[in-house]
Image: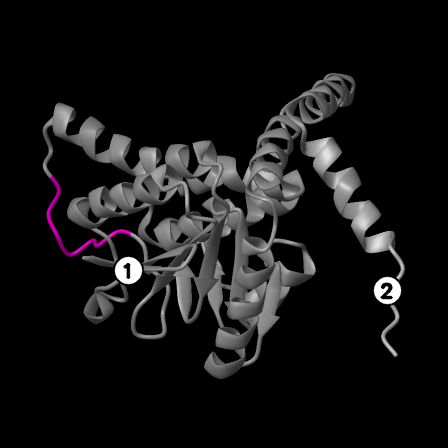
């Protein structure tokens, strides 16, 4: 199961099955999709947090439950898992994985599918699927987009534990904290900074960033030019100029 909490401009989805280290089944995946869609559809939502109960993020697929061997059921099940990442990728609400404990197998995939990652320095990541003899089939393309190819292939293939600090050094974790108390502080500060940004500017930046990762530089620069034109036409540039002018005004002296 999952828990969804809405506080001010932040939706928080908590994977809540601590007895199995928040390993997911079809029901949890379906609920996760609903939670992501609800955040994306809420005009007041400025950040989506995904975390896990019991001081662990997610151990991936729940392998204790027998899976239906009907082909149609298999396609539906795996389509659900793909849809999690399609929804995260489509959303103009920035997503933040808040990671303690283990984020392995599908948990590693889920963390990498978010826009940002904030983690405890003791957290452990890894494509543990390979330990049980099957590929990390959704995480492999995510890693291929995020890190240099040889490192992405090693992580996807070897199934070894990866310390959070290693991911931080390579730019896959945005903020690192020492212990639960510091993680809560770092999380709050990071989210507050996100929420303080202009919603339109955040949405446009997400859109351009995602497109640019898959475009030749010349095409990405053209898209940037077009976005600047849109910004000017929409009034966002005029608003920015007025703000800049207000900041430049000398303070009124009071005797």
Majority secondary structure of magenta residues: loop
Residue 85 spot, x, y in % from top left: 40, 38
Q: Residues within 10 Å of mark 1 (few under 14, many from 20)?
A: many
Q: How far, Cα to Cα, is label 2 from label 1?
A: 49 Å
Q: Quadrant of residue 189?
A: bottom right
Task: Tell me if residue 55 is in the magenta stretch.
Answer: no
Of the numbered discs 2 and 1, the one sitting upstream in the chain is 1
Which label sits on residue 251?
2
Q: Residue 221 carries which label?
A: none
**Residue found 26% across the figure and 51% down from its top:** 61
Place of residue 133 in the rendered image (x, y in percent of width and height, measured from the top left):
33, 47
At a point 63% along the width and 36% down the height, the residue shown is: 205
* Image point (48%, 47%), residue name: 114
Report the quarter where the C terminus lies: bottom right
> Which residues, given as a range, are shown in magenta?
61-67
Is 83 on the left or on the right of 66, as rendered?
A: right
Residue linked to disc 1: 15
Vertically, is 91 above or below 55?
above
Query: Label 2 crowding class (10 Å Cα cut-off): few <14, some 14-19, many 20+?
Result: few
């Amino acid at each position: 199961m999952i828990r969804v909490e809405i506080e001010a401009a932040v939706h928080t989805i908590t994977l809540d099955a601590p007895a199995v280290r928040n390993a997911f089944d079809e029901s949890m995946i379906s609920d996760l999709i609903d939670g992501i869609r609800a955040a994306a559809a809420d005009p007041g939502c400025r950040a989506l947090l995904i975390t896990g109960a019991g001081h662990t993020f997610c151990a991936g697929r729940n392998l204790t439950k027998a899976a239906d061997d009907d082909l149609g059921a298999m396609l539906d099940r795996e389509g659900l898992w793909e849809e999690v990442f399609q929804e995260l990728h489509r959303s103009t609400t920035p997503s933040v994985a808040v990671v303690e404990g283990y984020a392995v197998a599908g948990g590693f995939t889920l963390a990498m599918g978010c826009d940002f990652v904030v983690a405890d320095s003791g957290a452990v990541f890894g494509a543990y699927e390979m330990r049980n003899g099957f590929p990390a089939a959704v995480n492999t393309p995510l890693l291929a987009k995020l890190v240099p190819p040889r490192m992405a292939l090693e992580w996807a293939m070897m199934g070894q534990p990866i310390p959070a600090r290693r991911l931080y050094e390579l730019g896959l974790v945005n903020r690192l904290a020492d212990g639960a108390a510091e993680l809560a502080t770092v999380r709050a500060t990071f989210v507050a900074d996100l929420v303080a940004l202009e919603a339109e500017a955040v949405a446009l930046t997400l859109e351009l960033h995602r497109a640019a990762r898959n475009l030749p530089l010349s095409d990405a620069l053209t898209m940037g030019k077009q976005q600047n034109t849109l910004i000017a036409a929409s009034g966002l540039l005029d608003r920015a100029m007025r703000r800049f002018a207000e900041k430049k005004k000398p303070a009124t002296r009071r005797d």
